[in-house]
Amino acid sequence: MTAPAVLLSDQVFQINVLLWSLEELPDGRGPIEPVLRNAGYYLNSIGRRLTVPVAEKVRTTLRTAGIDDLMPTNPDLWLRHETDLVLPLIELKAHSFDPPSSNSRQASKMLVSSVDLASSVGTGKTSPGHLIYVTPAQESDAMLRTLSSLSANLTQAGATVAKFGVVGLSLDERGLSFARPSGTELPGPMAKALEGPAVVLKPPLEHDDIRPLYFIPWMPGIDDSQDSALRSDGLRELTARVLAQAIAIVGRSITPTNVAVRGDVLLTEATFGIFSKWRDNDRAKFVEAAHKVIVKALRGDSRVSVTGTLIEIDLPSTEAQDEVLKRLEDADPTDRRTNLEGSLGPQDRLFGDEVFGAKD
Amino acid sequence: MAIDQGYLPVLNTRDDYVDWLEGYSLPTVDELRAQRSTRKPVKTYMLETVRNGSARQELANSFPSRIQMERLDDNLYRVHDSVHSERVVGLIETIDDRHPVFFTTLAVDESDRWVRQVVDRNPWLDRLWLSSPILFEIWQYIQRTTPSHRYVRLGFDHEAWYESSEEPDESDVDPSFDLDQDEDVSSLRMEHRRSRVHLTERLGVLEDKLPQLIKLYDPLQSLVQVQVPSGGRGGHMLYYDGKATNRSESFAEHRSTVELILRLYRTVTERAEEMLWVQTSEVGEEGFSVEGAPVLIEFANPLPASTFDRFINLGLQRKTSRFRIGGFVEQRGRTKVHVTAIDRHLWQPFLLEVTTRHILAVLPRGTCGNSVHRLVTNVQRFLDPAAKVWLGSESYSAAVSASMPAK
């Protein structure tokens, strides 16, 4: 079982916990308490662009603070509330960071850009944001100190900064909770919901893993910071989902017929459509890896022909269909020789670093 | 007296068939003399057409090539089957565009076999799955609309199939269910709880006693048969697997009853799909949102670890499983698994978390809501008759109740 500290700092775990906390679920039932949904919050977007305002004062202040890069940032989650007009922007971090780090430049841009989100959301109306960093609970005090320091520097340089806060993730016998470090400021409904530690994942039975089902089993751009076992886990899960999509295509065909399978289609379907929306610096490599997973599962089958990125499977009869299904169902997502991880190779990465922001 | 095979005559209009079926249940002079009827009651099989993506198939293309469908009007087809020497095995009517129904007068063994052959290996067709909450809603309808002196027939069935202490070397194939038949052979060798209860009683008595009986004995929460009383004699027997038998004197009333069930079923299914489908949509520049809620099935009491093991090994990993779910199981501890699951009938992938306390399902956009009803039905029949179900934050029973037409 993964050590709690490793799990809490895993951004794939973090984003999935946040997504579950925003789900529609029955109150007090099941393994998950959607504490943010119960407080009136819902998901606006993942990875949406946050632009640095064009106002001269903002930009000159950033330059004064040593930040010349005015490229947009991409907070991990944008939330909305049923009644409160403040939009919480959530940034997930494995660890806190010090003011001189590269993450600080990103945080400074977010602090000045979140004051009014009107330019980012394209409305003429003022739209206040509230920047919230989510870290493991033991990192949250340090994270708050860093944000306070950055905010003070920007204010001293003449900038107006957004409200900000920190939410800590803690894991104990009560389960996985959102905790609010003392002195942090959160939007009203969220502050109320997190007055005490708010349990999101109830404790599993002894020796069971607390991890929930993952909407997103793998994230781009975090390979360097993610625990290698968790990375393998995510790629295994994604392999299973890719295979399941191939099984679906073959299983629902009515013989005699030919079916076509493509890596990009499998990945898009396997991620609820997310794959097609992520940035694609290494996208082709990942598509190729998904393609290889299917080719390896069906290796030696004379009914399968491969032309470029297209896998064509001839299904002249239900018997042939059953044989292909059996081979796909017998594939082992944990086998590194045939799964996505093995097909990608140790250095291969799918996506760029920018969608979820640079990660520590 | 000649044995009626149950094939329909070749007629050419809806009116001809309705007239023929309307008179079908009335005994002939020979039958009256012999004091027994050789006629098979009209059986109706309510079906689901599956989209598997965006568009449904043309109805005729959803059936295997042995079936020829002769269109009689916009919604009614005469069904010939080459396996039956091209004779008319029944009629198919698209009472609504999603749910065709198959009317037949074949003997029940023959018609059940026909549906198994045509539907159960067909990823574009499924049966309707009238889960216990749906049948209990029909029972509520009966109580609201039927005089209390009328007789009503209810059937309950729960078999704790995964409770057995036997090694999991048995087949997990679902025996065709018929309360009037003896138990299947394998069940005689297995020791586990099994409850099959028939109640034929005056409505007023059942209204009074049934809630107490259910409290005392939880298998009675697994309702699998309800007979909706007819306006005249007899009624319309509804089964959990979407079959309905006309035991009334009127085919027209039988068809209307089926239509009522379809309206309820379609409303609750589409309500579930709208709420549950997990999908992404683009938001702003570079952003996207994930929408959709899970299905939660909470067991009334935690499953024993041995039952959990049998369910995972037999129910979710055997290709012949009565749950018809396959896929890739990832163990997340002693009593928790994550499954990249495949509905092995409709071939639709989804995600499952199963523990001794609950099942949580995440359904991608396009998953047929029928799969939810099938899962609920099977959980109540084979795992826990008292399990509670939620679609997102809404109770499944409440969603069913809110979907009852003209309530």
Image (cartoon, coloured by chain):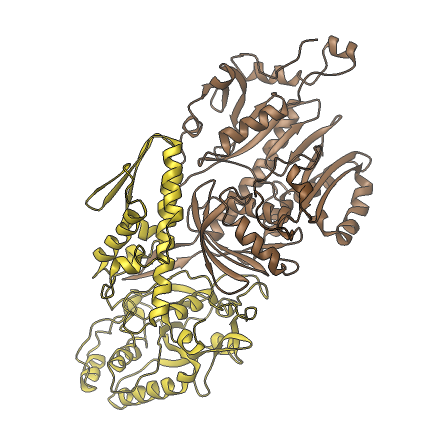
- Asked if B200 appears above or below A238 in the picture, the reply is above
Chain A: colour as depicted:
yellow
Number of numbered discs on residues: 0
Q: Is residue B254 left or right of residue B197?
A: left
Q: Quadrant of residue A306?
A: top left
Along the viewing direction, whichever of A82 and A106 lies nearer the viewer: A106
Looking at this view, is B120 or B99 the one in front?
Answer: B120
Q: Is residue A24 visible?
A: yes
Q: Residue at x 44, y 28 (%)?
A: B59
**Chain B: drawing colour:** brown
Quadrant where the C terminus of chain B sits is top right
Residue A109 lies left or right of residue A93; in this view the side is left
User: Percent from the top left, x then y, of residue B23?
Assistant: 67, 15
**Where the N terminus of chain B falls, by quadrant?**
top right
Q: Nearer the viewer, residue A161 or B124?
A: B124
Identified at 45% across, 85% down, the residue is: A181
The structure residue drawn at horizontal position 35% and vertical position 52%, both measured from the top left corner, is A242
Residue shown at 39%/33% (left/top)?
A319
Left or right placement of residue A285 versus residue A167 in this view: left
Which quarter of the picture shows residue B154?
A: top right
Horizontal and vertical percent position of residue A259: 31, 37
Position of residue A331 in the picture relative to residue B39 (left or right): left
Q: Where residue B79 sits in the image (x, y, percent)? A: 50, 20
Position of residue B56 measured from the top left corner of the image (x, y, whole percent): 41, 35
- Is there any visible trace of residue B53 in the rendered image? no
